[in-house]
Amino acid sequence: MSHTDTAHAGAAALAILQDAGEISRRWFERSGLDVEVKADGSPVTRADRDTEDAIRSALAERFPADGILGEEFGETESRSGSRWIIDPIDGTKSFVHGVPLYANLLAREVDGEIVFGAINLPSLGILVHAERGGGCFRNGRSVRVSARDHLDGAYVMATWLEDWTGARIDRLHASGAVLRTWGDAFGYALVACGDADAVVDFTAQTYDLAPMPVILAEAGGRFTDLRGDGLIDSGHAVASNGRLHDTILELLEY
């Protein structure tokens, strides 16, 4: 696939994602949203399903041969070697409690490589996206990761602390790093834009992580799982400005 083809697909995908983001934003601004609990214990709402349905329908019309993997409606086989990966509302727990840090996530994978990724934060009016070889952008403005090369004073994001051992937290604090729970996709957006230095996920799904490799790479950073491999399906991840990556992996002792 040429860079031009990727760019055209990316532009179409951004429009689709932003349109669907308005659906989730309208649900967010409503009161009394019903919440169900899925078999894995995670919450799901009508907003999740409506948002994913809108993205899937638009992608199927625009890219009929591509596969689709989504959190709520499973996988459609690819006939093209490409597939789209959707998380309609990343951060549903935040979403249902009125925290505006939820996101709509979309990635395109071609022959096993992520070539496009987007984090849409509709209630914040922030869209971070990247295409392979094309740079990383926040609302159309080119962004880069931070230049910090030491943990003292570094901001490290955690989606939640349930998976953190006391020893890991103690080692992080002893390094001088600042631990904050601005997690989920919002944390990755902060790192890509240079506003934070790293984010750690001990528990994550493929659709939570799919946009992150290309976004971090194009912003000058690094994305791996906790073992240092560049995988999106390991169930865990670290994203950083690159300079701090190996130090953080060593500190975590996963």
Image: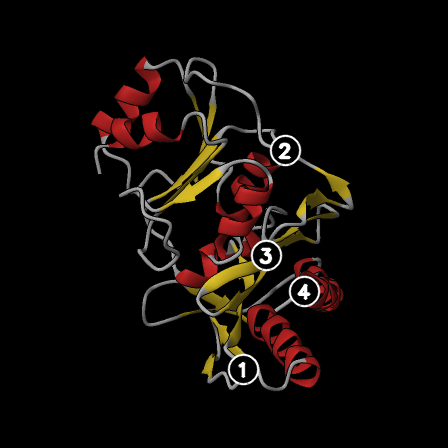
Q: Secondary structure at mark 1?
A: loop
Whether residue 159 is visible: no
Amino acid, disc 1: Ser
Q: Which residue is mark 1?
A: 80
Dot in front, 1 or 2: 1
Q: Which residue is mark 3?
A: 117
Q: Earlier in the sequence, mark 1 or mark 4?
A: 4
Which quadrant of the view contains residue 9? Answer: bottom right
Q: Secondary structure at mark 2?
A: loop
Q: Secondary structure at mark 4?
A: helix
Q: Earlier in the sequence, mark 3 or mark 1?
A: 1
Whether residue 66 is visible: yes
Using the numbered discs, state the Cα–Cα distance from disc 1 to disc 4 in whole angstroms: 34 Å
Q: Earlier in the sequence, mark 2 or mark 4?
A: 4
Amino acid, disc 2: Arg
> In the current view of this chain or complex, which residue is farthest to the front?
2
Name the one closer to the observer, 134 or 221. Answer: 134
Q: Which residue is mark 2?
A: 144
Q: Residue at x 67, y 61 (%)?
A: 3
Q: Position of residue 201 (x, y in %)?
A: 38, 44
Residue 160 sits above or below residue 56 on the image: above
Q: Position of residue 69 (x, y in %)?
A: 48, 74
Amino acid, disc 3: Gly
Amino acid, disc 4: Trp
